[in-house]
Amino acid sequence: MGLSQSFIKRMKKKLEKRREEILETLEDLIKRSSSDNDMAMDEGDKSLIHYSLHYLSQLSARELNTYKAIDVALKKIENGTYGVCEHCGKEINPKRIEAIPWAKYCVECQEKIEKGYI
Ligand SMILES: [Zn+2]
């Protein structure tokens, strides 16, 4: 039952890589914004990221949502609930996870959510 450890490990790497890419995008944004606003660079790492997330949210809500979803997925890997649909509690198809490692819902629930049934 469930996903194999090697599969989960592979997905974890994917998630971490994607998260890095998003953070790189954030850093680019900070660099660009810091030319107008040096103050942002003097803040601590945490507030810097917070600031950039805020900045990014204005720029791309989609990237921000992905970032949050990746965070959630990595926590699930830690506590062993990775790969389970948050709505119906069934296992998410590994093919779907392969395509979207941060997927929260199975295909059926995702479709219902998109149609506004849930
Ligand atoms: Zn479901």
Image (cartoon, grey):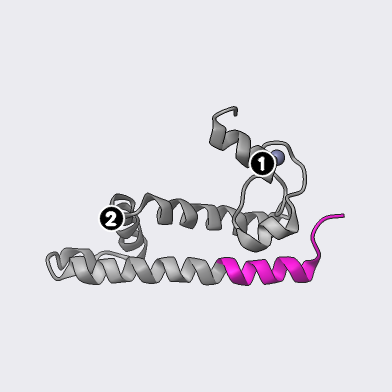
Question: How far is disc 2 from disc 1 in space, using C-alphas?
Answer: 29 Å
Taking 115 as reference, is 3 above or below it? Answer: below
- 49 sits to left or right of 40: right
Q: Position of residue 35 (x, y in %)?
A: 14, 71
Q: Residues within 10 Å of mark 1 (few under 14, many from 20)?
A: some
Please tell me whether the stretch drawn in magenta is mainly helix, strand or loop.
helix
Q: Residue furthest top?
A: 117
Residue at x 54% of width, y 57% of height? 71
Residue at x 31% of width, y 65% of height? 44
Count how many numbered circles sit on residues in the image: 2
The image quarter in which residue 105 lies: top right
From the image, tell me which residue sits under label 1.
86
Q: Is residue 42 visible?
A: no
Q: Is residue 110 visible?
A: yes
Quadrant where the N terminus lies?
bottom right
Disc 1 element: loop
Taking 47 as reference, is 91 above or below it? Answer: above
Amino acid type for the residue under numbered disc 2: Tyr
Q: Position of residue 83 (x, y in %)?
A: 71, 53
The disc placed on residue 57 is none
Q: Nearer the viewer, residue 78 or 66?
A: 66
Give the magenta part as a residue range. 1-15
Taking 109 as reference, is 104 above or below it? Answer: below
Amino acid type for the residue under numbered disc 1: Glu
Q: Is mark 1 within 8 Å of ligand 1?
A: yes
Q: Position of residue 49 (x, y in %)?
A: 35, 61
From the image, tell me which residue sits under label 2.
55
User: Would residue 10 be counted in the magenta stretch?
Assistant: yes
